[in-house]
Image (cartoon, helix red, strand yellow):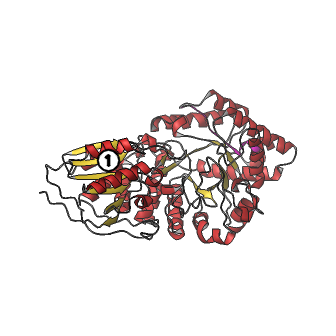
Amino acid sequence: MTQTRELTLEQALGQQLMFSFAGTQPSPEILETLRRQHVGGVTLFRSLNVQTPAQVRDLSAALQRAASDSGQPLLLIAADQEGGQLMAIGDGTTPFPGHMALGAAGSTELAYQTGYAIGRELAAMGINVNYAPVCDVNVNPDNPVVGTRSFGEDPALVARLSAAMVEGLQAAGIAAVAKHFPGHGDTATDSHHGTPILPHDEARLHRIELPPFAAAVQAGVKMIMTAHIALPALNGGSDMPATLSAAVLRKLLRRELGFEGVIVSDALEMKAIEQGAGLGIDAIAAVVAGVDILMLNANINDQQIITSALRQALRRTLIAADDVRASAGRILALKRWLGEQMQPPFEVIGCAEHRALALESARRAITLVRDDAQRLPLRLSAAARLAVIVPRPADLTPADTSSYIVPALADAVRHYHPTVDDIIAPLNPSDADVAALRQRVSGCDHVIVGTINAAAHPGQAALVNTLLADGIPTTVVALRLPYDLLAFLVAPTYLCTYGILGPSMEALAGALFGQIPCRGQLPVSIPGLYPIGHGIVQEMEAPVSL
């Protein structure tokens, strides 16, 4: 394996670049880049690079061959395989529930086993870095980008589960990436679109935001990803993103938390980072601040701007040569560790053991928040007409893959009841849509209605409130964030799944019909209504057919 001293300074600088590209095979552009210069690695994205697990395995192998043929060390090949709403490799892999579902289950063992299983599947495809776990503490119900990607609102819970997932991923031979440092959980702005500004001082950060990252460091996490959020209290009032802040990276992360691994930036095409000609300046600022690897987008012009800017800054000594070699040393040490890992057999991907684990996590997450109407378990005669209404999922942020999913709740319910009207509603129904849906279910004996971030989609709240006002027996299920209850306060029966993937839908159907107990507890509070840890935990009796 290449040693740092064997690299020229420009080659060492190249190790600090994480490229991306469009194509399900190595593109001519990425192959030319690998021939021309050293590269730290590549990030694979579902929309750009992914068809099937077998194709991803072949793509990873082709990229590694191209790097080896050019005399380069092992590439870092990374993906966002968090589980839940962000699955960079989707069809064919195990659909594991996301972080908040694991938070509702509250089990470090499940978090470890999930991390291990996800890591095994990624390693079988030749991916050696997972941009997970999300260590953000979601204390802001209006957070548009984290939400169910967080384990919850309690720093201690998030710390415990973050460390467990780090250990599981890395036991599988995958480098875990704790993100988004120093914490993206109390923002009401998406850093894909602007710079969230947090007014918190260091004392508050140590109390709320930092414990999960400290736990990840103690667990030996190999990489930490920066957040493009501004902390003026730590930067003399400046609104510079943490990615560009030496006070955040060199002082807080390196010196105070003692992190010795690789610091990777969040994606540099996000609008919190200057775009266009200013992109090169921000790239230089990030390296000077202490970032080891910059995550580049697939735009070739942007890649050239950043590469040229860094080389010029190195020539002009704006970037210290010793810092470049130190970063390359950390990256090469990580690559040596990855090179020692064994690749699992391809058959682990989507195997029965992993599917059973995903279903167990989903079952233990189902949270019964309220059943004032005493409707559960559902006891319906075989002739009863049951409707299931679910919003059509969309990607609510760029960090989302929900649009690839068609929720299969109605199919899951049919295992317990023969007559089911399967209704896919718009994500934000208009008044006309609500009226049409109301008419469609008017003769039903019971309605199960799912919601997805209802606070941001008032049409969903209008639909639920209309059905409740009509007196139709209705069970409401938050398929993503528990906060949806605030949009229809009078809902008498309310559950949470924290996700829309198949195992969560199967688990929900079983809970509704009394085949499994509801054991989950809220990992976040519902302001003014229910605290963290609330959940009606009971062994639910099997239904009696009438």
406 and 27: which is toward the camera: 406
Quadrant of residue 2 in the image?
A: top right
Instruction: Point out residue 65 in the picture as x, y percentages from the top left corner.
Output: 60, 34
Would you name the residue on which mark 1 appears?
389
Please state the horizontal and vertical placement of residue 330, each as a whole percent of the image: 70, 53
Q: Quadrant of the C terminus?
A: bottom left
Q: Quadrant of residue 205?
A: bottom right
Vertical comparison of 492 with 123: above or below = below
| 341 in relation to 19, above or below | below
Q: Residues within 10 Å of mark 1 (few under 14, many from 20)?
A: many
Residue 425 visible, this angle: no
Point out residue 370 in the picture as x, y percentages from the top left corner: 33, 66
At label 1, which amino acid type do we have? Answer: Ile
Q: Position of residue 509 (x, y in %)?
A: 28, 54
- Magenta stretch, residue numbers: 13-23
Q: Secondary structure at mark 1?
A: strand
Q: Is residue 348 left or right of residue 377?
A: right
Which residue lies at the image location 60% right of the left edge and 62% below the top edge? 220
Q: Residue at x 30, y 56 (%)?
A: 469
Q: Foreground residue, 170 or 235?
A: 235
Task: Please give the count of numbered marks on the rendered protein.
Answer: 1
Q: Is residue 79 something that shows in the picture?
A: yes
Q: Is residue 223 magenta?
A: no
Residue appearing at x 35%, y 50% in the figure: 463
